[in-house]
Image: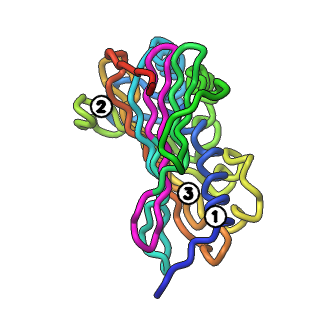
Amino acid sequence: MVMHYPNRLKVSLRIMLVAALPLFLSACLVVAGCGGNEGPSDVESVVARAQDAGEAIDSYHMVLSMSFEGAEAGQVKTEELVIDIAGDNVSLKDTFYDPETGEGTVIQEAIRIGDKQWGKDLTGGGWVEEQATLDEETAISYTSHISDFVSNSVSAQMLEEEEMNGVTAVHLRFELSPENVSSLLTDIPRSNLESNAGGQVDIWVDATSYYPVKYEMVFRNVTLGSGYNDVDVRITIDITDINRLLKIRPPV
């Protein structure tokens, strides 16, 4: 069967991504490095320690992947966002994927160094100087949401430590009710979430530094429109090279 991927579906996915990203970037600071099974009160007790660790992050490499899965569509990767942060410097590359062919199309590529920013001309291939809009403080500002998964979940559990992205990491899991999902995704149209079946958030945090190394959220039974109803939306973020020397150079 040929799958059609109209622009309005792309818009729905972008809204979902933009709404969920602050929650992911904040959730990664909710936990600290301790193993075993714990309850929500233990999660609350480590929020302050984890937030302190998050405020010490100055540089990192982040890869965000988004996909959805449904009975008709199967499993479809829809987007990959790659971001490097190095102090005041930022680089970003955003790629959308055709579900029929798997072919990726870059929809944005930009570099900011200090007060200068360049964007890539996606038709001509060259770089042009543009208004500086990329902001390294944006990710940091998301930490103001770190309590969202504590107050908007039906259960929270500390799982066993695992090796993840090169470090020993604590695995934390939040279970979300349909009401939790609606409360967290306030920017998503209510019609997209009316039939949602809750969700799950998994977070891995370095057991020594408390820095986040991976987190993943699944929203179940979401309506995206354009014939894509009752699909599970999955967003995964891998974070590496935290506070390592990352060189972001001007493109010209």
Q: Position of residue 224 (x, y in %)?
A: 64, 66
Of labels 1 and 3, earlier in sequence is 1
Separation (CA) of disc 1 from disc 3: 7 Å
Q: Position of residue 203 (x, y in %)?
A: 42, 38
Magenta stretch in the rendered image: 82-104
* Predominant SS along the magenta part: strand
Q: Amino acid at mark 2?
A: Ala
Q: Amino acid at mark 3?
A: Phe
In the displayed structure, 184 sits above or below 53; it is: below
Residue count near mark 1 (Cα–Cα under 10 Å), binned few <14, some 14–19, many ≥20: many
Viewer-nearest residue: 104 or 64: 104
Spot the residue most to the right: 190
Q: Residue 49: tell me if it is visible.
A: yes
Q: Amino acid at mark 1?
A: Asn
Residue count near mark 2 (Cα–Cα under 10 Å), binned few <14, some 14–19, many ≥20: many
Q: Which residue is mark 1?
A: 196
Q: Which residue is mark 2?
A: 169
Residue contact between numbered discs 1 and 3, judged by CB atoms under 8 Å: yes
- The residue located at (48%, 15%) in the rendering is 49
Of labels 2 and 1, earlier in sequence is 2
Q: Position of residue 246 (x, y in %)?
A: 35, 19
Q: Position of residue 2 (x, y in %)?
A: 48, 84
